Amino acid sequence: MGTASDPEQVGLKGTASVRREDVIGFRVRAQHLHRRLPATSRHRAARCGLPDGAPRSAVLSLHARAGGVGPDDWDDPAFTQVWGPRGAVYVVAEADVAVFTLGLLPTDGRKRQAAYEAADAVRDAVGSRDVRKRDVLGAVGNRVERLLLACTTGRLRVRWDGRDTLVRVTDPPQVDPDEARRELLRRFLGALGPATVQGFARWAGLSIVDSRESWRALTDELVEVTVAGQGGPAILDADRAALIDAPQAGGVRLLPPGDPYLLAADRELLVPVAAHRRAIWPAGTVQPGALFVGGELCGTWRRRGHRVEISTWAEVDDAVRAAAEREAGGFPLALDRDIAVTWVGHSPGSG
């Protein structure tokens, strides 16, 4: 996770020493995976943004964290969609658009100018219409990276319905981009801390220069953390008490591919066994979802239509099986048949 002498940590206020279990417990509770939020508070589940992808990952992530979620809740007026961290489609609270757009605007003057020029080109091509992504690409030289860059100005929204992506131009949030980026870092550390400069850059899709600049701007708010004897990462000082001796988390969830909990850079901490990490984050193929039991990732799952296949790395008891099957049966997806769950035994590398 780094060393205590990392230059980014110079000037941080104090240190804290914690165990792996404390980090897991902190993240689980910060992301509301220990106990579902009431339906009236579900916007809190999107505080770190919800990456969206087939089959409506944002809805399944929301369902893992809040009650009363329906298949069309991604389209609720309280939420909107943007190209957010790493250029992925994100469902975010309407009030948080600045954090997940302007928070990604480059600090380099030339890159920032290029972002505004790309946004101007999209505005000229789109006007007040909702236009398909493929039809607006010509305005930015058929370069997807320029379209994603334009989104960092806060002037674009998207609508991905599982089949196509529509692009719309809107007025940008009246928020200072530097403050938006600092808030983005706070959201990241509040959900996936302790973490490092490199971890933030990877999660957000920022350059290491921009990540480091944000880190330095928050120096007075950060505390260095030693995890299992290794120093380097940091946490918000406001979260220090919640991290130290964090209580162990219960609960069984089926986290979808790309779930916020799975986006931490320190995968070795989340899943110590290399073969199990390769199962959750396979290279060159579609990622599965993850079986989450009591704060630990214990296997993977995949869905085809109404069939869900769960593969575990060790034996799980009947209570866990029943809870996982209830989770699958409660998926807020528009299906014409009930979910059928199959357990396929241990994955390669178990034991």
Image (cartoon, grey):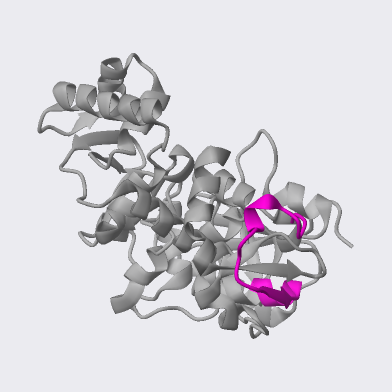
Is residue 70 depicted above or below 139 in this figure? Answer: below
Q: How many labels does the image show?
A: 0
Q: Over which residues does the magenta segment extend?
A: 1-24
Residue 218 lies, in percent from the top left, at: 49, 60
> Measuring 68% from the left and 85% from the top, which residue is drawn there?
245
Is residue 175 depicted above or below 31 in this figure? Answer: above
Residue 103 located within the stretch drawn in magenta: no
In this rendering, position of residue 37 left or right of residue 229? left
In this rendering, position of residue 320 left or right of residue 192? right
Is residue 122 depicted above or below 279 in this figure? Answer: above
Q: Assign the N terminus to one quadrant of the image.
A: bottom right
In this rendering, position of residue 83 left or right of residue 290? left
> Measuring 68% from the left and 47% from the top, which residue is drawn there?
281
Residue 5 located within the stretch drawn in magenta: yes
Quadrant of residue 325 in the image? Answer: bottom right
Residue 88 lies, in percent from the top left, at: 44, 41
Viewer-proximal residue, 177 or 335? 177
Q: Assign the C terminus to one quadrant of the image.
A: bottom right
